[in-house]
Image (cartoon, rainbow, N blue to C red):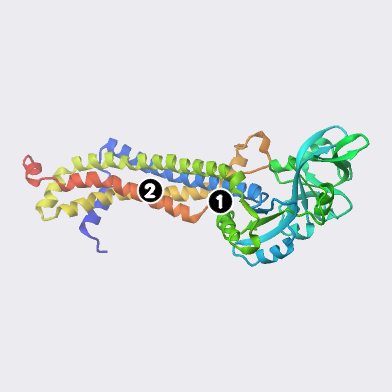
Amino acid sequence: MFQPVSLFIGLRYSRSQKRSGFVSFITFFSIAGILLGVASLITVVSVMNGFEGQLKQRILGLVPHVVIETEQQHIGNWPQLLTELKDIKHIQSATPYIESDALVQSATQLRGVLMQGVYPEYEQQVSSIAQNMQSGDFNSLVAGKYQMIMGVKLARDMGIRIGSKVRLVLPTKTIFTPMGRVPVQRTFTLAGVFDMGSQVDDQMILIHGQDAAKLLRRKGDGVDKIRLYLDDAFNAQAVATGLSLKSNFHGLSMHTWNTSQGSLFQAVQIEKNMMWLMLSLIIAVAAFNIVSALVMVVIDKQGEIGILQTLGMSPFGVLKIFITQGMVNGLWGTFLGAIVGVIFTLNINSLLSLFGVNILGSGFVMQTLPIDLQISQVFIIIGSALVMSFTATLYPAYRASKTQPAQVLRNE
């Protein structure tokens, strides 16, 4: 089969067994270094993607992406606003709710929590809590029955079971009694517990919105907030800006999840970028071992380069020979690394389980590493490794192309 002369000679040099042991040693470790760097980068980035996805699910699945609220005690036209919000781009659902700080008291403990008054008919299909009920029924929140749902960790710490009586105290709301001014309080029945596997499990309780309005002494349904869930949480700022320009939303304030959780995701992104940088440097160091190997090959092949130039090969042809030889090493390391990295990533949890290794620590015995292998990132890693390998071949190839035949062949 026909091959260009430069490609033929470059491939022949790369397969040649007649080279010094030290050159072969450097070549082997340059290929091995690229392989390990590419495989490590694919694995680490996939795990970081998985952890970022878990954060989005566990935190942004609970935290409203956008909150619409009023400084007054009631959004009177909230049903009309919900109808309008359904037709706005990026908004998947909108639910009304009431929120207040509260205290929960059992027979033995008193804990501070965040109380939310919700409406199950709006929350059932979209609430992450409703989809992660460990026991009980989310729809058991019925107006007037004073039922409560709390996290499994909070219930366990306070020694509360389904059907237990719990006292809910609102320290910010007080009433006058013969005993003086006392906080508003009411006895509730625990109707269900949820398990989100996050901090919300011991920080939040849910009751029906109308029960919350009565405790807070509000007229009607008492809804003062509307939370929006979007198709992508990172569109929150654009959606909030667009809503603030609509006439029906004048006088209402918009808050996005960035206010409370933005710093956490920025920290995760910075950590992810640093992992990219550090592992890319490993690939770069391994790729530039190609420089050392090729420089030694150029010195070793001075006579052959001079003969090729005497026979009419141009300096550019010599350049292509050594670029080809260096790129063969880069291609081997990159594609073997990609194959090893993808296979290892897809089977990492099985391997850790096989050898009894628990990376997450004793507190996460039942959990596995979250994996999100993105093909686009694999191709970016492959492309970056090949670019580094190509860059590493340029200087030795340039040196070879500048060889002077007369000086090289003078002593031949």
Left or right, 86 with respect to 29, comes to right
Look at label 1 and name its amino acid.
Answer: Asp
Left or right, 130 with respect to 244, comes to right
* Mark 2, other Cα within 10 Å: few <14 / some 14–19 / many ≥20: many
Residue 362, given in percent of the width and then of the height, sits at: 66, 34
Tell which of 409 and 62 is nearer to you. 62
Residue 20, given in percent of the width and then of the height, sits at: 25, 37
| Mark 2 → mark 1, Cα distance in angstroms | 21 Å
Tell which of 43 and 89 is nearer to you. 89
At x 47%, y 52%, the residue is 377
- Answer whether labels 2 and 1 touch (C-beta < 8 Å): no
At x 61%, y 65%, the residue is 88
Residue 329 seen by the camera: no
At x 22%, y 60%, the residue is 4
The residue labelled by disc 2 is 385
The answer to which quarter of the image holds residue 3 is bottom left
* Above or below, comparing residue 208 to residue 179 in the picture: below
Left or right, 301 with respect to 237, comes to left
At x 24%, y 64%, the residue is 2
Look at label 2 and name its amino acid.
Answer: Ala
Left or right, 318 with respect to 291, comes to left
Quarter containing the N terminus: bottom left
Residue 147 seen by the camera: yes
Q: Residue furthest right?
A: 178
* Label number found at residue 372: 1
Tell which of 396 and 116 is nearer to you. 116
Check disc 1 and report its element: helix, strand or loop: loop
